[in-house]
Amino acid sequence: MATQRILDFLATRRPNGPCLVVDLDVVRDNFRAFEKALPDSRIYYAVKANPAPEILRLLTAMGSSFDTASVVEVEMAMDAGAPAERISFGNTIKKERDIARAYQLGIRLYAVDCVEEVEKIARVAPGSRVFCRVLTDGEGAEWPLSRKFGCVPAMAVDVLRHAKGLGLEAYGVSFHVGSQQIDLSAWDRALGDAKKVFATLAEEGIVLKMVNMGGGFPTRYLKDVPAAQAYGQAIFSALRKHFGNALPETIIEPGRGMVGNAGVIKSEVVLISKKADNDNVRWVFLDIGKFGGLAETMDEAIRYPLVTRHDGSETAPCVLAGPTCDSADVMYEKTPYPLPLSLTIGDEVLIEGTGAYTTTYSAVAFNGFEPLRSYVI
Ligand SMILES: *Cc1c(COP(=O)(O)O)cnc(C)c1O
């Protein structure tokens, strides 16, 4: 949300054009809240949510580990001071030469979800630890991750057995319950599946050690979300329920929940118009849209809180759109967004909860608009 530090920064620096401002104090508080909520889990920050060097350096200093998806993300975490032992290569889709490069850099922990990927790792990252990702239904998530990643639990058994056979360490199971997950019981279902894989392999003498419980922890947008503590309690009781006293090592990989509420985008109204004189819906065009960093407005999945200097006055429904010449660059139309009638061209609009998944989604220069600038304070 717009902290006083962010508001002061914008008031004194008056940056031109749309930009993201991230308050590191909020990231620090979020990290501590995760540590407190799940004291026995290691935190692997999902670098893709916001790889700003200041954020990675802060989290490294606080003892965080990092979930990365490419060699460049591995290098970003290392540049921030993270040792290789604190970095996992968590993408299930990797080129063999990228695995080889990560291995050279010292990375020994890899995600897989099929035997084909296991074979790549066995060839170029011998002896490494692998964890197999299982599918989840994504139910309850506002940004579900679909069937792209993971396999069914029965197949995970084959994948990990194969890994062991090729001299890798069959280390554990991972899942991701879907991003912006507000159903606390989602982890219970996924942990039940993880336990099945543990139990089947144990019968064969293959003892898994770790469950990677992924991300999914939410940011507050327009609606309240449960606090980190509530997630911690729900997850801990699900772990107890399925694993009893033989609790595995656990990892969490928060992305959105670590940085989402730490950032605010400052934007400006470029145009307000109607499509016909008798329309009651106004079109409000901002200087940022889907291609400038707000890609998660796709299908109107994420609805960001908007703040203007006219808040509190009478509102009317608005279609919200970006400045590019692409007709897909419309953010809220199916469910128009109520904005003050007194909002005018040139007004500033603050878009809250934008610390995650914005700078990384911004196009390089579509229509000549520069990539989303970011200030980390
Ligand atoms: C993106 C991602 C995360 C972070 O998810 P959030 O919902 O932002 O917390 C964690 N783990 C993996 C493997 C991911 O791809």
Image (spheres, rainbow, N blue to C red):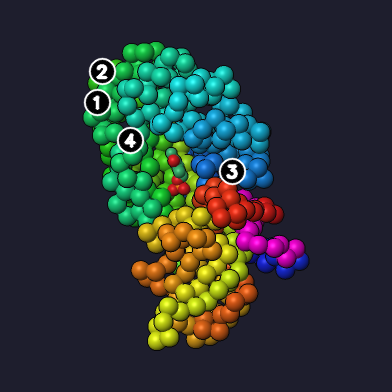
Expressed as whole percent of the image width and height from the top left, the position of residue 239 reads: 35, 41
Residue appearing at x 39%, y 45% in the figure: 236
Going 51% across and 84% down the picture, which residue do you hit? 341
Distance Cα–Cα, label 2 vs label 4 = 22 Å
Number of residues whose C-alpha sits closer than 10 Å to that of mark 3, classed few (under 14), some (14–19) or many (20 or more): some
Q: Which residue is mark 1?
A: 200
Q: Nearer the viewer, residue 291 or 46?
A: 291
At label 4, counting other C-alpha atoms closer than 10 Å, the crowd grade (few under 14, some 14-19, many 20 or more) is: many
Whether label 1 touches label 2, CB < 8 Å: yes
Residue 204 numbered tag:
2
Which residues fall within the magenta stretch? 13-29
Q: Give, as a three-letter code, the residue at label 1.
A: Thr
Q: Which residue is mark 4?
A: 150
The span from disc 1 to disc 2 (Cα, nearest Å) is 7 Å
SS type, badge 4? loop
| Alpha carbon separation for disc pair 3 and 4 | 24 Å
Quarter where residue 318 is shown: bottom left
Of the 4 image quadrants, the one containing the C terminus is bottom right
User: In terms of secondary structure, where does tag 3 sit?
Assistant: loop
Q: Nearer the viewer, residue 362 or 148?
A: 362
Q: Position of residue 40 (x, y in %)?
A: 48, 39
Q: Secondary structure at mark 1?
A: helix
Mark in front: 1 vs 4: 4
The answer to whether the residues at label 2 and label 4 have Cβ atoms under 8 Å apart is: no
Q: CA distance from mark 3 to mark 2?
A: 41 Å
Q: Which residue is identified by label 3? A: 51
Where does the image place residue 209, in percent across and percent down from the top left?
39, 27
